[in-house]
Image (cartoon, grey):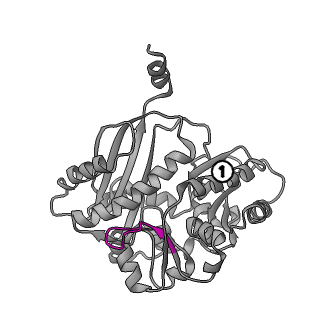
Amino acid sequence: MPAARTIVHIDMDCFYAAIEVREYPHLAGTPVAVGGRSTHRGVLTTANYEARKFGCRSAMPAFKALRLCPHLTILPVRFDLYRAESQRIQGIFEAFTGLIEPLSLDEAYLDVTHLRSRGGHVAAEIRARIFEETRLTASAGIAPNKFLAKVASDLNKPNGQYEVLEAEIPAFMQDLPATKIWGVGKRTAERLEALGVRTCGDLQCWKLPALTREFGKFGLDLYQLCRGQDDRLVLPDRERKSVSTERTFSEDVTSLHDGMEKLESILEELTADLASGHTDRRIAKSFVKLKFSDFRSTTAECAARSVEPDAYGRLLEEAWSRRGEQNVRLIGAGVRFASMCVAEQLELGV
């Protein structure tokens, strides 16, 4: 049996909005969002907790957010500033471990198994260093694997942390809502509810063959994750073949027009992710992925050298045409990289 690991998931609190409030102190304590300037086509990238109290959230059209919260301040996205802060935070991580797997500008997994201190103490020290150096708050989850660490980081937000020890996993999973499992959105939750499943404890009563009959390949994920099992490693040095951003929606997307609006904010996040750590990689292809309400997926892709919104719009149209009578529960956009060796050969003219 492999030795227990200690994984920390750090998630910055309303990262973009928090940076803007720090830069404009007079906005402290007021509803603030970051996103497109246009109130007709603009989409929120993020919103602070004061804005969320009114129902404002990421991927929401700006006009709808302003209806919910007329005194909402919407500031333009400043990715250069956010990337700079992300790099400062990355430097703090590196003072504790070299095993860092960034997920985006504002969150990352850290493997701190090698440190003698208890994971909770390490996480608290990291969060304190982040605040001391950036005046920004972070939340953390600490657990023996990535799945549980990510779930735990959401339990004491904002500016808090939660630790799940190895011996506590069975009890922790019993009452954990099944909706906390990665990939379980509104439609899956409804199917689970119809089957009498509300918690991970309920889901543990189902055998693997029955879950795969009901949910296909996703059944294996459900079987393992409802038990708190996840053997994925924190892999900082692997050569990534692609980078993508995906969103599973609480309500299915029913029109191409709405899909285009949601794609806009997804592309903003994708652009930020690429700029934060992949500027040395050559883009070979762009792609759009859709997952339908019946869990089928489709991907449309084309040759590309950069993130071009018009090209992604055409890819979305192509993928959308394959949906038949199904609605869309997930939209993703990404790029595929040329391999390092091929890119070097192209640079050298080989």
Query: Foreground residue, 349 or 234?
Result: 349
- The part of the chain drawn in magenta is 33-43
In the rendered view, tell whether residue 80 sits above or below residue 255: above
In the rendered view, tell whether residue 182 sits above or below residue 305: below
Left or right for 141, reference 350: right
Residue 112 visible, this angle? no
Residue 10 visible, this angle? yes
In the rendered view, tell whether residue 146 sits above or below residue 38: above
Farthest residue to the top: give it: 350
Give x and y (percent) for residue 273.
51, 50
Q: Residues within 10 Å of mark 1 (few under 14, many from 20)?
A: some
Query: In the structure shown, which secondary structural element does the residue marked by tag 1 occupy?
Result: helix
Query: Foreground residue, 210 or 125?
Result: 125
Quarter assignment of residue 228: bottom right
Give x and y (percent) for residue 175.
55, 76
* Main SS, magenta residues: loop
Query: Foreground residue, 93 or 273?
Result: 273
Quarter assignment of residue 133: bottom right
Q: Which residue is mark 1?
A: 87
Residue at 29%, 69% (x, y): give it.
252
Residue at 45%, 52% (x, y): give it.
270
Give x and y (percent) for residue 232.
57, 48
Residue at 23%, 68% (x, y): give it.
254
Quadrant containing the C terminus in the rendered view: top left
Query: Foreground residue, 205 or 215?
Result: 215
Count of marks overlaid on the render = 1
Give x and y (percent) for residue 22.
66, 70
Residue 113 lies in the magenta stretch:
no
Amino acid carrying mark 1 in the image: Gln
Left or right for 239, reference 149: left
